[in-house]
């Protein structure tokens, strides 16, 4: 589903109140260039998405008469009021085509590391420049009942007071709304097994640890190394009871799991000595082939490799 015409620019005042500005169309940005979105690149804002104001950033829209971008430096409906750009953070399983278009003011604050997608308003709804990249519904907003999540999470936290990893995942679930952690406490699909406080990469887009003075990370990295018992307690229970069960090392709240390769291999061996059900997965930068071999021999089923570098080698 796409809009029939270019949606309007969306703006916010200093208090964060959002409104549309019909005199300008929405614009997007790609690699520093401001563009008019193609109608075929726009989809309704997915359920479970969020809208963010961008402090210290003035919105840029699209002027239809001149067919060019136009800066909005003041709030058009509130005399003397500043104006902020607005972006969308789309729900999981979606990929942005264009980021929000804005002009940054001097001394604008650094922003947390989210995907700030271009958003507009038209035909009674918000539209974003993006597309659905994964048809699996395991992280869709309509799959989560918050009251049930709260109940089951607090119940499991009470039952596993001595398992530090379960307690950590409780914060991921209730504090950060992590879909994988929520699914773990709901007893279904893919459950996370974070294990490594350390990393051997320095990705500029790391969401769990940033250098002092840089942009804030979006979540707290795990601060301890869980034991084989703590990891396998979660994995065995999940794989033997959950529908379509997967357990995954390598989460957004940790560093590189291969740095704990021997721990992971021992965990996999213990889990597979109890059950052959489900999938044991690893999300990794695949930087340590010897450790990967160790995990494969222990019974690792799958691996998702992320390559975050602009350098060819």
Image: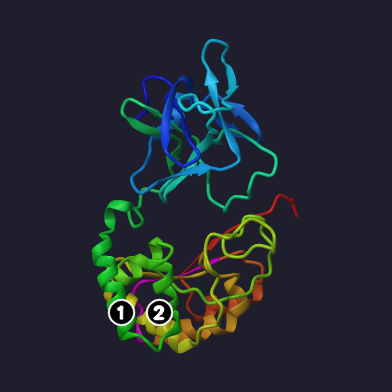
Q: Please indicate, yes or no, whether residue 39 appears anywhere in the rendered image.
A: yes
| Numbered badge on residue 88 | none
Q: Is 50 within the magenta?
A: no
Residue 281 covered by magenta stretch: yes
Outermost residue on the top side: it is: 65
Tell me if residue 115 comes above or below residue 263 in the rendering.
above
Q: Earlier in the sequence, mark 1 or mark 2?
A: 1
**Does 10 sit above or below residue 277?**
above
- Is residue 235 or residue 81 the one in the foreground? 81
151 or 295, nearer to the observer: 151
Q: Residues within 10 Å of mark 1 (few under 14, many from 20)?
A: some
- Left or right of 174, for residue 28: right
Does the CB distance between marks 1 and 2 fall below 8 Å? yes
Q: Position of residue 257 (x, y in %)?
A: 57, 73
Total marks placed: 2
Q: Which residue is at 42% across, 38% downward?
A: 17
Considering only vertical position in the picture, is 21 above or below 65? below
Callout 1: SS:
helix
Residue 11 in the image, given as x and y percentages of width and height? 48, 32
Image color mode: rainbow
Point 30% across, 67% down: residue: 188
- State the quadrant of the C terminus: bottom right
Residue at numbered disc 2: 166
The residue depicted at 59 percent of the width and 79 percent of the height is: 261
The part of the chain drawn in magenta is 274-283
State the residue position of label 1: 156
**Image location (x, y in percent) of residue 2:** 37, 28
In the picture, measured across the screen, residue 189 lies left or right of residue 287, that is: left
Q: Is 145 positioned to the left or the right of 173 in the image?
A: left
């Amino acid at each position: 589903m796409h809009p029939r015409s270019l949606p309007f620019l969306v703006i916010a005042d200093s208090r964060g109140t959002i409104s549309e500005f019909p005199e300008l169309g929405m614009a997007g940005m790609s690699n520093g260039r401001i563009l008019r979105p193609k109608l075929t690149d726009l989809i309704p804002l997915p359920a479970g998405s969020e809208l963010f104001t961008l402090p210290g950033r003035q919105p840029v829209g699209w002027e239809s008469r001149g067919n060019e971008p136009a800066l909005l430096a003041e709030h058009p409906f509130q005399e003397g009021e500043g104006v902020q750009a607005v972006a969308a953070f789309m729900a999981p399983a979606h990929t942005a085509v264009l980021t929000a278009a804005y002009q940054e003011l001097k001394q604008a604050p650094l922003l947390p590391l989210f995907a700030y997608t271009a958003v507009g308003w038209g035909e009674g709804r918000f539209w974003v420049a993006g597309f659905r990249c994964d048809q699996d519904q395991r992280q869709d907003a309509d799959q989560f009942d918050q009251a049930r999540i709260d109940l089951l999470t607090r119940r499991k936290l009470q039952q596993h007071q001595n398992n530090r990893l379960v307690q950590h995942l409780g914060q991921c679930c209730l504090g950060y709304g992590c879909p994988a952690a929520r699914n773990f406490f709901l007893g279904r699909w893919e459950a996370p097994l974070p294990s490594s406080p350390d990393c051997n990469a320095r990705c500029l887009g790391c969401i769990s640890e940033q250098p002092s003075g840089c942009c804030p990370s979006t979540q707290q990295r795990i601060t301890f190394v869980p034991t084989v018992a703590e990891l396998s307690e979660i994995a065995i229970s999940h794989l033997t009871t959950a529908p379509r069960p997967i357990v995954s090392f390598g989460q957004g709240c940790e560093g590189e799991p291969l740095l704990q390769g021997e721990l992971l291999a021992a965990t996999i061996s213990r889990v597979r000595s109890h059950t052959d059900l489900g999938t044991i997965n690893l999300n990794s930068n695949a930087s340590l082939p010897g450790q990967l071999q160790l995990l494969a021999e222990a019974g690792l089923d799958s691996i998702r490799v992320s390559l975050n570098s602009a350098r060819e080698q």
